[in-house]
Amino acid sequence: MMNVLVTGGAGFIGSHTCVELLECGYQIVVMDNFVNSTAAAVDAIKKITGKEFPFYECDMLDLENFEKIFQENKIDAVIHFAGLKAVGESVTKPWLYYHNNLVSTLNLIALMEKYGVKKLIFSSSATVYGAKNPIPYREDMETGGTTNPYGSTKFMIEQILKDECVPHPDWSVILLRYFNPIGAHPSGLIGEDPNGIPNNLMPYITRVAAGKLPCLSVYGDDYPTHDGTGVRDYIHVCDLASGHVKALEKTETMQGADVYNLGTGCGSSVLDVVHAFEEASGVKVTYKIAPRRAGDLAEYYADATKAKKELGWEAKYNLLDMCRDSWNFTKKRMEQEAAGK
Ligand code: WQD
């Protein structure tokens, strides 16, 4: 069975994918610099699976330390999650985003070359479809026209990885374009817990439900959508995790670069999410209608047929499941905080 290096393995999507990899029998080596995650997630992965693995607290920009991982382990494939991901922050700190996300990936490519690692899965984003494509988004649509440095790093890294497959025809690279990941592992031991006031919808909703923030602002109710609020393709993070394992299997039988959407194919509005959350949790979410947020699109969701056909993968969880598991994680976190942990 393959030994898989997971960069950013303590993060939201990384930690869930580590659990899925271990449960499918893969060996893993995990690295993270804890810039937006904690060692508690690493312990939780071990607790959920009952399995051990090497962990390195390491920054991918520190090439010398990063190389030690390749010296000390025989790596067969890499799943590259590590990166900065806050859209708003990327607008105020573009150098930080370009430097961090691009140089870390370039360092990874150099080490893959040096150590003969030929399989790579990369965390891309639906944001690479830009603003001009019709919905649903299909993998063969033109990408680019990204509207913030975060999104531009995803677009640029996709291009870099496609270019690397030209002089390396025996590499297998899969770019996964995520839609809106929410939910948490049903154990409630790992999930999404951003620092500070959340930017994304579900972490904001859970904080309002938990009584830590007074009111959700719904950014716009005059979009041309079924109820006027913005529509997205929310996907359970455990579905996303299983998509990575399917992509890894695919690297065994393909060469070059290929790209897959990981979405459900269903659009839900902000108010659909609020109502599903209330139903799943039994807790009321106070909200008010606020002006549109700059840079938001009215509506987008995935065409999920390519991943179904070629990877044998499709999302299993619905919006209620996602809300239930996000809330379960939040409640567990609050219990831990109350117990002073
Ligand atoms: C979802 C919907 C908001 C907060 C972003 C990035 C994307 C990806 C995921 C990740 C929108 C509305 C939100 C709030 C609201 N990147 N909303 N009140 O913008 O679709 O995607 O995160 O690493 O690249 O752009 O996600 O969760 O911020 O917003 O009404 O307080 O919820 O307007 O319609 P988004 P989101």
Image: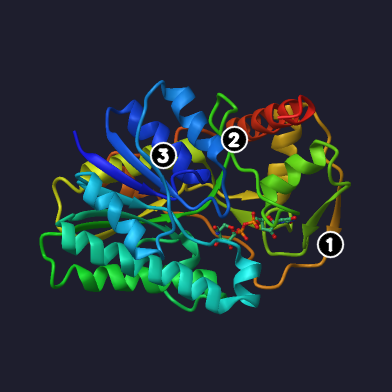
Residue 27 sits in quarter:
top left
Q: Is residue 243 visible?
A: yes
Q: Quadrant of the C terminus?
A: top right
Q: Nearer the viewer, mark 3 or mark 1?
A: 3
Q: Which mark is residue 322?
A: 2
Q: Residue at x 60, y 66 (%)?
A: 87
Q: Residues within 10 Å of mark 1 (few under 14, many from 20)?
A: few
Position of 173 relative to 54 (above/below): below
At which x and y percent is residue 292? 76, 67
Residue type pointed to by label 1:
Ala
> Are the residues at dot 3 and dot 2 in contact (C-beta closer than 8 Å)?
no
Q: Earlier in the sequence, mark 1 or mark 2?
A: 1
In the image, what residue occupies the spot 63% across and 55% down?
231
Residue 257 in percent (x, y) is at 23, 62
Q: Are marks 1 and 2 in contact (CB under 8 Å)?
A: no
The residue where tag 3 is placed is 17
Circle 3 — which element?
helix
Residue at screen point 85% across, 57% down: 289
Single out the mark in the foreground, 3 or 2: 3
Q: Amino acid at mark 3?
A: Thr
Mark 1 or mark 3, which is nearer the start of the sequence?
A: 3
The residue tagged 1 is: 290
Q: CA distance from mark 3 to mark 1?
A: 35 Å
